[in-house]
Amino acid sequence: MSVKHKVFANLYQDSVSLMQISAQINKLPGIEQASVVMGTETNLIQLRDAGLDNGCQAGPNDLIIAVRGEDEACDEALTLAEQRLKSKPEESNSGGVRPPVLTSLEMAKETAEDANLALISVPGDYAAAEAIKALNLGMNVMLFSDNVSMAHEKQIKELAREKHLLVMGPDCGTAIINGMPLGFANVVKRGAIGVVAASGTGLQEVSCRIDQLGAGISQALGTGGHDLHEEIGGISMLFGVDALANDPETQVIVLISKPPARPVAERILQQAQKAGKPVVVNFLGADAEEFHTSGITFVHTLADAAEVAVALLNQKTPPASVATIAPADEKVLAAESAHLPAQRREIRGVFAGGTFCYEAQLLCKQQGFSASSNTPVKGNTKLTDIWHSQGNTIVDMGDDDFTNGRPHPMIDPTLRNQRIQEELNDPKTAVVLFDLVLGYGASMEPAAELLEVIGQVREKVGAKNLPLLIAHVCGTEVDPQVRSRQIENLRQAGVLVAGCNAQAALWASYVARQQAEK
């Protein structure tokens, strides 16, 4: 096994492009692991931790390709990655006149004077400076970059508030602005429901379900996961509430977050009450009764947020929560569970979406099944070894714990699929619970790659010896991956596909309860 690397001095590409190249060369035969990153101090540490360092010397402005695998495969991967890095976009038919390469926000602004949004995806060490430049040029900011300190985030957002501009992020991976999906967003209908979310996959789940229910999105604004922290004060969510309140195309507002700091939540809810429009709030895991707010509808799940928002838009009575199991589903689950041996008792959740992992933990815990996790909710326990499950275990494979030196599992699900394979092989596993997240930037055939892994386990141990597989697919029919095609592929392979993440978590809890009673 060889470890090789190549350094390109003063070469920059955004992190999404680098993750996509990493994903491509990770799949080459003979490659065990590969990473394409900028040479920041954080990335160098991650390469060393991943066993890809190999004496690499690089500065923060340098780009690194690092691979581990069979000797010839490493050479092939380095060559392919270099070709991808140096490939140029097709030249336009501009009569032989080539436009200048834009190397700064100032140049971009001079070229497109009306531009009012900058999407910034540079390493976190430089992100704050670029965001401040954009704000000073009068542009709103979507800050895809992570590893931005709270102090810098506060500085950026206070400047934005002073200039009456919006900052989405840091670590904002999803937004839909004027119908344009940005980052890991889905293709959804335009409509009259506006969303502000401190959760990327939470925003995806709500916007997709609104689309599935026949309604549409006016604007979907990500705030970054730290925005509702007391130190930041919810600056971006407060701006988003005001923006949607003043937007004539928005008739209903949805707010999504993990439990915010209480003083921040109170400020946001007071602002939301002044919006003059129906507001639906899903603060996952928070106790709605603590806030004593009138005129705001609190819901328990992401799917409920979409259901209630669409009902309010159509001036209908809000439906009952999806956090129940229909009698027909119960019958199917009982029949499927009847074939499982009694020793299979444990829930193993393996998620690409961090908010899906969080919501699944909350719902399973409410059903009596505490779990271990790398990102435990209140009352659950931290995994002592994130690479090995213990008892009920629900992990977020998209967390930094697993993505150091690797692409996010929504781009390259290889590591996530390997974890599912391990859980299938564990004789204690009753049910494997997982998500498939579709949309721009996500893997083009996530079901096909996973089913190949499941098929290998099935061939080895036999279909009757497998635990149950329960999934939900976050996406729409017009996403590049086509939601119905992914669902059909899963069902043909025997996977039980729920309508939403909350329903999938309840199904898994039901199976575990059946097993506990044997």
Image (cartoon, rainbow, N blue to C red):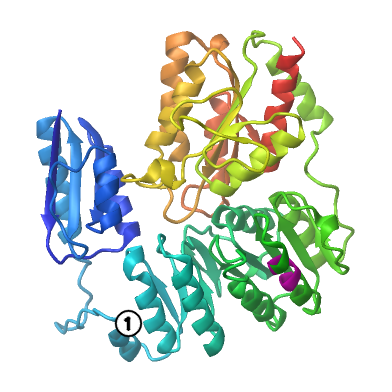
Residue 438 appears at what percent x and percent y? 50, 49
Region of the chain picked out in magenta, as a range: 264-268
Q: Tell me if residue 372 comes above or below residue 253 in the rendering.
A: above
For the C terminus, the image quarter is: top right
Q: What element carries label 1?
A: helix
Q: Tell me if residue 153 comes above or below residue 298 in the rendering.
A: below
- Residue 433 appears in view: no
Quadrant in which residue 219 is drawn: bottom right
Does the stretch in magenta take in 267? Answer: yes
Looking at this view, is 487 or 110 the one in front? 110
Q: Which residue is drawn at 85% across and 52% down?
A: 319
- Asked if residue 285 lies left or right of residue 174, the reply is right
- Asked if residue 96 lies left or right of residue 453, the reply is left
Looking at this view, is 464 or 512 the one in front? 512
Kind of residue sitting beneath label 1: Leu
Quadrant in which residue 331 is drawn: top right
- Residue 106 appears in view: yes
Quadrant in which residue 131 is drawn: bottom left
Q: Which residue is drawn at 75% across and 17% down?
A: 514
Q: Residue at x 68, y 75 (%)?
A: 241
Instruction: Name the main secondary structure of what is drawn in magenta.
Output: helix
Q: Residue at x 44, y 17 (%)?
A: 457
**Residue holding disc 1:** 105
Residue 265 appears at what percent x and percent y? 72, 66
Looking at this view, is 272 or 490 the one in front? 272
Looking at this view, is 518 or 78 the one in front? 518
Does the stretch in magenta take in 245? Answer: no
